[in-house]
Amino acid sequence: MDLVVESREKTRTMVIELSKKVKKIGEDDPRRVAHSFKAGLALTLVSVFYYVTPLFDGFGVSSMWAVLTVVVIMEYTVGGTLSKGLNRAVATLVGGSLGVAAHQIAVLCGEKGEPILLGLFVFILAAAATFSRFIPEIKARYDYGVTIFILTFSLVAVSSYRVDELLQLALQRVSTIVVGVATCLCTSIFVFPVWAGEDLHKLVAADLEKLANFLEGLSTEYFAEKGEVENLETKSFLQVYISVLNSKPTEDSLMSLARWEPGHGRFWFRHPWKQYLRIGALSRQCAFSMDALATYITTYPKFKPSSDPDLHLKIRKTCQEMSSESAKALKELSSSIRAMTVPSLASRDASTVVATVRKLEDVLSEGKATSDVLHLATIASLLTQLDVRAREIAGSVEELARLAHFKRFDPMHEVRVKP
Amino acid sequence: MDLVVESREKTRTMVIELSKKVKKIGEDDPRRVAHSFKAGLALTLVSVFYYVTPLFDGFGVSSMWAVLTVVVIMEYTVGGTLSKGLNRAVATLVGGSLGVAAHQIAVLCGEKGEPILLGLFVFILAAAATFSRFIPEIKARYDYGVTIFILTFSLVAVSSYRVDELLQLALQRVSTIVVGVATCLCTSIFVFPVWAGEDLHKLVAADLEKLANFLEGLSTEYFAEKGEVENLETKSFLQVYISVLNSKPTEDSLMSLARWEPGHGRFWFRHPWKQYLRIGALSRQCAFSMDALATYITTYPKFKPSSDPDLHLKIRKTCQEMSSESAKALKELSSSIRAMTVPSLASRDASTVVATVRKLEDVLSEGKATSDVLHLATIASLLTQLDVRAREIAGSVEELARLAHFKRFDPMHEVRVKP
């Protein structure tokens, strides 16, 4: 009896855990809930073909292909649905035509030769197409298309051996696939659309802000502390850049989807998506350096008592200025991407940084440094490197602003009064 | 006329370029060529169902599903084919059964209610299943299964409205899918198999070797140089770690495929694949620090003329020792993974490194350091960090050796002579 109660208890906690998890996933991004309903909607719409008799009589059992297409093509982003839909439609057409052609040739070889020749064709084309998927350019953009090409070619070529009205069947199938693709596209684009391009835009801006938060935390929670920094490893700024380290796959996939999307909102059709990857790559490099710096300061968290407290304080202050300036610059870059305005402050900040670096060099060359100062100097060197990175990022954001015709934040900026 | 010649010339160069590229892809990994032929073979085998009349009569038009299954399931690695095959088979069964059940319930509602109720079922299940794909655990292992589940459920539920012999159709379909999966699995496992697990094993070992090569290059081509280091940016060791920076997606996907694979060669069924991800994560962190170091030495390539050449030389020599010791340790770890033997040298090397670090600290605290020495000291700090990382890696490789029961390289090692 106890066992029953216990296992019931267990099941209850499991169900509660699961529902909490599901709730969190939905709350984190409510578009996920919308997407699920959209997928259900598209599928229900397309299954109308089965229920309405005049429609069913037009397409016959081929209506199945519309259902199949919707299930397989419906993706989270508009770009995903578009790329899969176009791949599927074009590949079906090409594969189907080649399949019919293969059938015509095979028929010439008579009753016995036909299956052998068909088998040979299928073997050669499937092998060649499978190999083509190893070519990176094809893998990135047409992987799904190649699968569908092999599929359609094999189906048409093989079933041509048994089916007589081949052309009619092929036409029916193509038109049902077009219906499926069209249903998915309409649901994708017109009902709460999720644009991969917009996500990429926001992701790149958010990553820059994370980098800024690290530097800001460094300035206010590490360098600003008078004495020892307590509980350093629990500080949140030491974790904030970590998601940037592995952002490459997300950025790559969003970018390859964004290329398929039509213009939407603030983005034109030929928006320079590639430039976002460049900014992303520089942000990642910046995060790598941050990781080295964060590891360094957590490995050696204590400032040693200094024999020259003045010098010590001076370097520390310069470091603080430097990181706070870089943080400001990165914040400004992030918000200028968000607002799609030309970054203006950023370049000014970069020059401040240059001045600060000079100051640090002066400070260091001033006096003879002892081992306690060496610790700080290492941190300063790493910070300088971060500044170099931040300036590179500023350059690439300016390039983006130029390519994507960001507007100027302050129109007065352009007006020059003659002396 | 010139235009024709020119465009012919252009096409010729394009074709030559393409064939060179294709040749290179094949030569880089001949298993790709084998895989292409395997895919062709599996497809040809399964299309026999169409050509041989007694077989065709048994399965009817459903044979199409065998062809479809082979095209969609055939993956490069055994793990990929297995995971897709099992996902497809199980999802078809579950989706099909639920579809039949939905049909039974809907029938109770009479002629008019049936399509409405069926549509509602499809909507709810498709929405719920689509949402479940956002749960990370399901996304990682059962994403394809969920797609097939939605597909089968919708097809069965929807076509139940038109087809009378539903159960027979469902059985035919399941059996053809089983035939397709079996064909793929046999081709995958018995003809030149590509094991994801083995690839993961080799990748992790190769990455460790790359890290070792960086440190070795640093020791022989940077620290060993007497005067200035010429053409630093062209040195190959500064590039060697770069592929490690972004190895996470490859490792993750290989690991999730390896889990599906049965025991093969030197790997048992429950080989600790997760531990490889841990070693991979540490290697990546090590590569991050290398990136910071590499950037630092390329930004400031010159050693400044020193006011204390002896001290300068001493630090430099210590750095050289340190990097060469870490390189040796990493090399040893890499080859012990390759040979699946317990790393023995590695732990010895780590202690040598500790000694070297102490020596460096002594050297630094000995004299008052000037700004030229600061440069070297920064490099030394970063190197120390790399050593910490290398020791962490050694620990995780030892853990792997324990979990995977690596054999001892030298049995004499275990024998202890009593005094």
Image (cartoon, coloured by chain):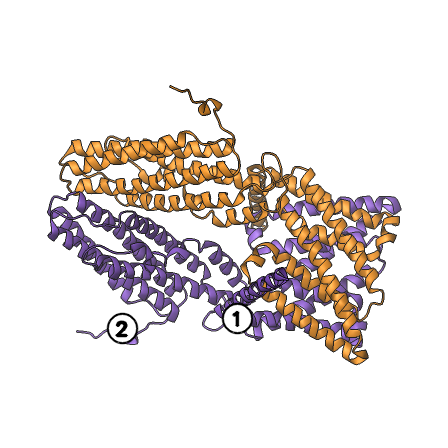
Chain colours: A purple, B orange
Mark 2 touches mark 1? (CB < 8 Å): no
> Where does the C terminus of chain B fall, quadrant-wise?
top left
- Residue A30: percent from the left, percent from the top? 51, 71
Q: Work out whether residue B16 can be spotted.
A: no
Residue nearer the viewer, A113 or A252: A252
- Residue A41: percent from the left, percent from the top? 64, 73
- Residue B162: percent from the left, percent from the top? 81, 70
Element on which disc 1 rests: helix
Camera-near label (2 vs 1) is 1
Query: Which residue is at 29% across, 53% downward?
Result: A386
- Residue B326: percent from the left, percent from the top? 35, 34
Relative to B317, B42 lies left or right: right
Element on which disc 2 rests: helix
Query: Badge 1 local density, few (<14 within 10 Å), some, or many (20+)?
Result: some
For residue A413, which numbered disc appears in the image? 2
Query: Badge 2 local density, few (<14 within 10 Å), some, or many (20+)?
Result: few
For residue A31, which numbered disc appears in the image? 1
Relative to A79, B105 lies left or right: right
For residue A336, which numbered disc appears in the image? none
Amino acid type for the residue under numbered disc 2: His
Of the image marks 2 and 1, the number of the one nearer the N terminus = 1
The chain to which mark 1 is attached is: A
Residue at the limit of the structure toward the front, as seen here: A1
